[in-house]
Amino acid sequence: MARHKYNFTIAYADTDAGGIVYHGRYIEIAERARMNWMRGKKIPRGDNFIIKNLNVNYSFPLKLGEDICVETEVLKVGNVFLDTVQYFLNPENKICATMNSRVAYIGPDLRLKSIPE
């Protein structure tokens, strides 16, 4: 499956006093990228994907004003889970962070449900 690309500009609200992206903001930016990737996918009303597990490896800081790209890739599709990886790339295409997640599929009753085709 091809990687989905999401472009994002680092704003003041994303950084600490030194102009470096605060570690917690990576999760929020990754969620925006994931939601952008989900656009256009046909998910039955009331069903949802939720994060079950998350692991972030920070390699190199992102900085204020940088135009970055978050690339999202599905590594594995199970019956009720997706395993994904998201790469945070700086303007020089250097991987600054890698986020692995397991995403569970749930129905309106908040119970695990088989992922539809």
Image (cartoon, rainbow, N blue to C red):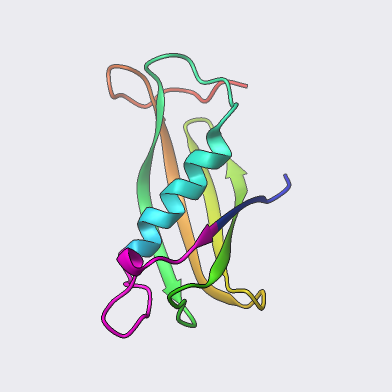
Residue 26 is situated, as x and y percent measured from the top left of the image, at 39, 63
Residue 23 is situated, as x and y percent measured from the top left of the image, at 33, 71
Q: In this view, does 33 lie above or below 26?
A: above
Quarter of the image that includes the N terminus: top right
Tell me where the magenta segment starts and ends, as one range.
Answer: 8-24
Residue 18: in magenta span: yes
Q: From the image, give the main secondary structure of the stretch colored magenta.
A: loop
Residue 100 is situated, as x and y percent measured from the top left of the image, at 48, 59
Q: State left or right for residue 19 relative to residue 87.
A: left
Q: Is residue 78 visible?
A: no
Q: Which residue lies furthest to the top in this view?
A: 45
Front residue (pair 51, 70) = 70
Front residue (pair 115, 36) = 36
Q: Can residue 12 be seen in this view?
A: yes
Q: State left or right for residue 76 relative to residue 34.
A: right
Q: Residue at x 48, y 40 (%)?
A: 35
Front residue (pair 5, 44) = 5
Residue 112: in magenta span: no
Q: Is residue 9 above or below residue 49?
A: below
Q: State left or right for residue 98 relative to residue 93.
A: left
Q: Quadrant of residue 17?
A: bottom left
Quarter of the image that includes the C terminus: top right
Q: Is residue 26 above or below residue 93?
A: above
Residue 80 is situated, as x and y percent measured from the top left of the image, at 47, 31
Q: Is residue 23 above or below residue 39?
A: below
Q: Residue at x 47, y 62 (%)?
A: 99
